[in-house]
Image (cartoon, rainbow, N blue to C red):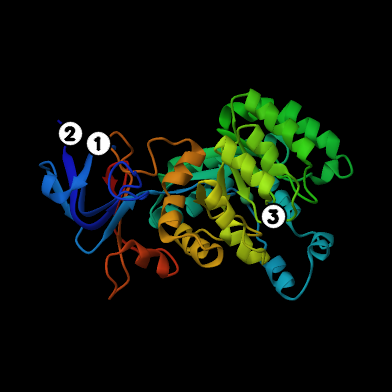
Amino acid sequence: MAATTVVRGIDVLLTMDPNRGAGQWGRIDDGAVAMVGDRITWVGRSADAPPASVVVDGAGCVGLPGLVDCHTHAVWAGSRAVEFQRRLAGANYTDILMAGGGILSTVRATREASLEHLTELAAHRLGAMRDKGVTAVEIKSGYGLSPEAEERCLKAAKAAGTRAGVHVSTTFWGAHTVPEEFRGNRAGYVREVIEVQLPRLADIADAIDVYVDDGAFTVEEGRAILSAGRQRGLHVRIHAEQVAYTGAAEMAADLGARSADHLEQIDAAGIAAMARSGTLAVLLPGAMLYLRDPPPPVGAMRVAGIRMAVATDLNPGTSPVADLWACATLACVTMRLTVEEALCGITSAAADVLGLADRGRLRPGGAADFVLARPAIGEPPEPAVLLQHLGAPRLEALFVGGVRV
Ligand SMILES: [Zn+2]
């Protein structure tokens, strides 16, 4: 029989399962968790813990499932640091585009990069995330924008996950922006996405995404692309209502979208549509910070019963942020999420965005991805401490697939 590992004496264990422990985050004081192989086998109070061949002491710590980052663009090549400085000096987006910067500069660098180079870059990024307790990450394509380059990005995402020991979900995002060779012919590019890229890539992606906004794709184009993806069995996601209100979230909700992401400009109709369809909101405070955007209407979404996830949106331009803990803190400070909402947002809610039933929660049968976090020196082992201090806490222990790493 396989060995049983029990982590016990955990001051506060958050199962993120309201059926196991108190509140939405399933709080158990003096908790314990048992693992056999790569699965959780038992969760409860230390006094009731099963016998174990390996015992880990969780005293002074907060325990929670491996974190889930449900919105990243972690596959890219090139650098946007010069653009960052130009923006700080007052350059606007058009100036930067004219100087050859912006998204299209990342597209050029990504197209020139080999599969191996893209994999190596993404694996480094994922490795740094895993060191902070993130064990599942969604990665979108979207810096290739051609059938070959989009395929390379999706393959690099999967290979990087294997190399870094992180579960990766992939999202096809050919409809990120119109590439240079289709300039002035957006309709032609939408056709290419639907008729060439999607048939080629549907089998290596879990979801499809589209960027509907002022200066991006229209609601009608977004509907056509997402509908085509849904027909091929992909989960529907959308970048919506970030720069301007367009009705994109409502459209995606009507298509049964798993999530609508950003939402700074969402209106009452969009909120009602998301609530009706059970579409989750993915909040991206990194992008909000870098773009100096206003916060999304979290209060109205909460009242409507919309569940909220929080993600890094890791990308080289508008959210060069790889620290999911810091994003949870920013969601509290800038968007007024509660600590409980933010911690559910980087675990259970994020797992639901990706359809990962066995992650983001601690329950028997689930993946044995487990984080034992130690609060800053002098602080009590309380969940709020983990988010009050900006940036990832020190990890006392991290289990990925039941293996202590
Ligand atoms: Zn994004």
In front: label 2 or label 3: 3
In front: label 3 or label 1: 3
Towards the viewer: 208 or 81: 208
Whole-percent x and y of residue 212? 73, 45
* Residue 188 visible in rendering: yes
Q: Earlier in the sequence, mark 3 or mark 1?
A: 1
How far apart in space, not on screen, are marks 2 and 3 (Cα)?
A: 52 Å
Residue plotted at (21% across, 52% down): 31
Q: Would you say 35 lies left or right of 84 here?
A: left
| Image marks 1 and 2: residues in contact by CB distance under 8 Å | yes
Label 3 CB-ligand 1 distance < 8 A = no
The residue wearing badge 2 is 2
* Residue 34 visible in rendering: no
Whole-percent x and y of residue 253? 63, 37
Whole-percent x and y of residue 4? 17, 40
Residue 100's label in the rendered image is none
Q: Earlier in the sequence, mark 2 or mark 3?
A: 2
Name the quadrant containing residue 50. top left
Q: Amino acid at mark 3?
A: Gln
| SS label for mark 3 | loop
How far apart in space, not on screen, are marks 1 and 2 (Cα)?
A: 7 Å
| SS label for mark 1 | loop
Q: Would you say 150 lies left or right of 134 here?
A: right
Towards the viewer: 317 or 230: 230
The residue wearing badge 1 is 37
Q: Amino acid at mark 1?
A: Gly
For label 2, count other residues whose C-alpha is less than 10 Å away and answer few (under 14), some (14-19) or many (20+). few
For label 3, count other residues whose C-alpha is less than 10 Å away and answer few (under 14), some (14-19) or many (20+). some
The residue wearing badge 3 is 265
Q: Earlier in the sequence, mark 1 or mark 2?
A: 2
Q: Amino acid at mark 2?
A: Ala
